[in-house]
Image (cartoon, rainbow, N blue to C red):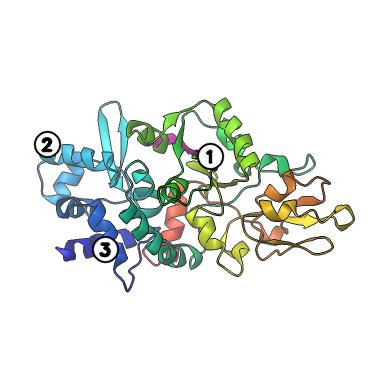
């Protein structure tokens, strides 16, 4: 019985984002909570490209008319991903993060949450800090960008949103799981914007609700006021934007433990202080999600910790905090699309 879950874990680890093994075996406990042995066997037959039922059935040696409903139910349960057009469905593997874990936002339990919280630091180390291409990146909040600064469309949340024809708003799984354990921060729960095929999947599975561009733009203002970091997926055509807090977000929370978080994130910006304008009020210290700012006579920014989110700038009463672009040699060009992102990740992990 355990063997099927070990094989599923290996299958997930061979996907771009990875699913590394641990000494405690917590990764297997998680899979046992989420998959029956039969579901695990089927999930191992799916790859990272959507395929019709007939193609998957032929590869697995199963009857398509029997396998079809099973695949559909597995996609409804968040074990695999589904692309639907009219009554035609195609199925593909879902990575654990971002993927299977987030798809369970509406059916969490405390035991699963505790296991995942034990596991995420292992996943972050192997699937995030040890490879060059990350799944997410950080862009500055609009209020931190001055009029003279040139910002590319894929680095401006407002422009990303205006390019979307389908937007679905979903709850943040990180804040929800913290609330369930009595550790909630009280910041907005509905804070994840999903676009394109992901938006249809979320809507059809009851994971979120469709909103207009104007509603999404309004949420950006709410996020800035709440001190949330904007993290779109890492491509020039993002599939989502997450609005994250340093206390609950599994990515930010684990990056915060690093000595140099700035090296573990894709961001083209940093913050500088105009010393003569700083009154040492410490407002910026409270806004920073990475503990990058300290105050003696004036505020000082540790550039090894600054991720360029711009939150410290928006509440500075004397405009002493200024957003700056990194040097050209340090600029990061995101992959053109999500497929390119995943190919880069898989290559760096030695999986292709």
Please tell me whether residue 158 belongs to the stretch shown in magenta.
Answer: no
Residue on which disc 3 sits: 28
* Secondary structure, magenta segment, majority class: strand
- Which of pointers 3 and 2 lies earlier in the amino acid sequence? 3
Residue under pointer 1: 188
Other-residue count near label 1 (Cα within 10 Å), few / some / many at <14 / 14–19 / ≥20: some
Tag 3 near tag 1, CB within 8 Å? no
Image quarter (top left, top right, bottom left or bottom right) of the C terminus: bottom left
Residue 297 falls left or right of residue 165: right
Alpha-carbon distance for marks 3 and 2?
A: 31 Å
| Pair 3/1: label in front | 1
Q: Nearer the viewer, residue 266 or 273?
A: 273
Q: Residue at x 55, y 43 (%)?
A: 187
Region rendered in magenta: 191-197
* Residue 170 versus residue 294 in the image, above or below: above
As helix, strand or loop, the secondary structure at mark 1 comes to loop
Labels 1 & 2 near each other (Cβ < 8 A): no
Say which residue label 2 marks. 65
Q: Residue furthest right?
A: 276
Residue 124 image position (x, y, % from top left)? 45, 63
Which of discs 3 and 2 lies nearer the camera? The answer is 3
Image-quadrant location for residue 142: top right
Outermost residue on the front side: it is 182
What element does badge 2 sit on? Answer: helix
């Amino acid at each position: 019985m355990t063997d099927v879950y070990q094989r599923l874990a290996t299958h997930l680890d061979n996907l771009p984002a990875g699913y590394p093994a641990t000494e405690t075996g917590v990764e297997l406990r998680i899979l046992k909570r989420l998959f029956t042995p039969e579901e695990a066997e089927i999930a191992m037959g799916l790859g990272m490209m959507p395929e019709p039922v007939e193609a998957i059935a032929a590869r697995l040696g199963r009857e398509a008319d029997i396998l079809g409903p099973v695949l559909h139910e597995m996609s409804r349960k968040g074990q695999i991903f589904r692309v639907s057009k009219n009554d035609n469905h195609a199925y593909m593997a879902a990575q654990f993060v971002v993927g299977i874990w987030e798809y369970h936002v509406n059916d969490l339990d405390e035991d699963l949450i505790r296991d995942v919280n034990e596991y995420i630091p292992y996943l972050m180390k192997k699937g995030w800090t040890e490879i060059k291409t990350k799944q997410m990146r950080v862009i500055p909040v609009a209020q931190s960008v001055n009029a003279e600064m040139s910002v590319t469309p894929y680095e401006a949340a407002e422009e990303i949103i205006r390019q979307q024809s389908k937007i679905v708003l979903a709850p943040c799984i990180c804040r929800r799981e913290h609330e369930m354990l009595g550790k909630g921060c009280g910041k907005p729960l509905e804070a994840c914007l999903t676009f394109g095929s992901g938006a249809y999947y979320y809507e059809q599975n009851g994971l979120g609700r469709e909103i207009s561009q104007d509603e999404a733009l309004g949420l950006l203002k709410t996020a800035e006021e709440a001190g949330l970091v904007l993290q779109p997926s890492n491509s020039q055509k993002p599939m989502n934007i997450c609005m994250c807090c340093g206390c609950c977000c599994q990515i930010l929370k684990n990056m915060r433990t690093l000595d140099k978080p700035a090296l573990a994130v894709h961001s083209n910006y940093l913050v500088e202080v105009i010393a003569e304008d700083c009154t040492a009020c410490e407002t910026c210290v409270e806004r920073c999600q990475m503990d990058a700012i300290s105050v003696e006579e004036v505020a000082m920014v540790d550039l090894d910790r600054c991720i360029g989110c711009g939150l410290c700038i928006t509440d500075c009463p004397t405009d002493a905090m200024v957003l700056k672009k990194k040097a050209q040699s340090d600029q990061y060009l995101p992959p053109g699309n999500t497929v390119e992102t995943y190919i880069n990740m898989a290559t760096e992990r030695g999986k292709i």
